[in-house]
Image: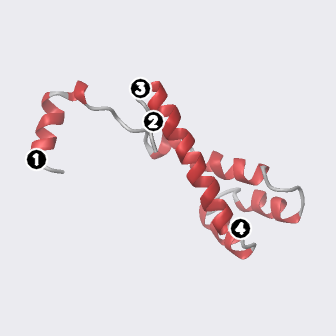
Amino acid sequence: MDEDLATEIENDPERFLRFPTKYEIHEYRIMEDFIEQLSSGKVQNELAHAIRGKGAFRRFKDSICYHGLDQRWYTFQANAYRELAIHWCEDESLAYTE
């Protein structure tokens, strides 16, 4: 981090806003939401099973690639992140613009 910026943050912390951490974003919930919006059936069941237990993120990514859903997933994920950004801006009384 730039030393001047670090000094500014230290000297005037109220001037800066903290972004949500990866723990506040809940990537796992985004994966669940993606799975829920799929048509009921084999693919939905396989993805739901893939996100259980250790290695869930890797299995999920492997499964979406196997089923040709990777672009659909990345679009869904980008929209979910956009919604999170919009809500964060609203919570901080900031205007959201694209």
Above or below, 64 against 98 in this view is: below
Above or below, 40 against 91 in this view is: below
As drawn, is 83 to the left or to the right of 18? right
Q: Amino acid at mark 4?
A: Leu
Residue 40 image point, x, y percent: 89, 55
Q: CA distance from mark 3 to mark 4?
A: 34 Å
Q: Which residue is mark 3?
A: 92
Residue plotted at (49% across, 43% down): 23
Name the mark on residue 3.
Answer: 1
Quadrant assignment, res 62: bottom right
Name the residue at the right extreme: 41
Q: Depth-wise, is mark 1 or mark 2 nearer the camera?
A: 2
Of the numbered discs 4 and 1, the one sitting upstream in the chain is 1
Foreground residue, 91 or 56? 91
Badge 1, how many Cα within 10 Å: few under 14, some, many 20+? few
Q: Which residue is mark 2?
A: 96
Residue 63 image point, x, y percent: 71, 69
Of the numbered discs 2 and 4, the one sitting upstream in the chain is 4
Q: Amino acid at mark 2?
A: Tyr
Q: What SS does tag 1 mark? A: helix
Foreground residue, 46 or 14? 14
Above or below, 96 against 66 in this view is: above
Name the residue at the front extreme: 98
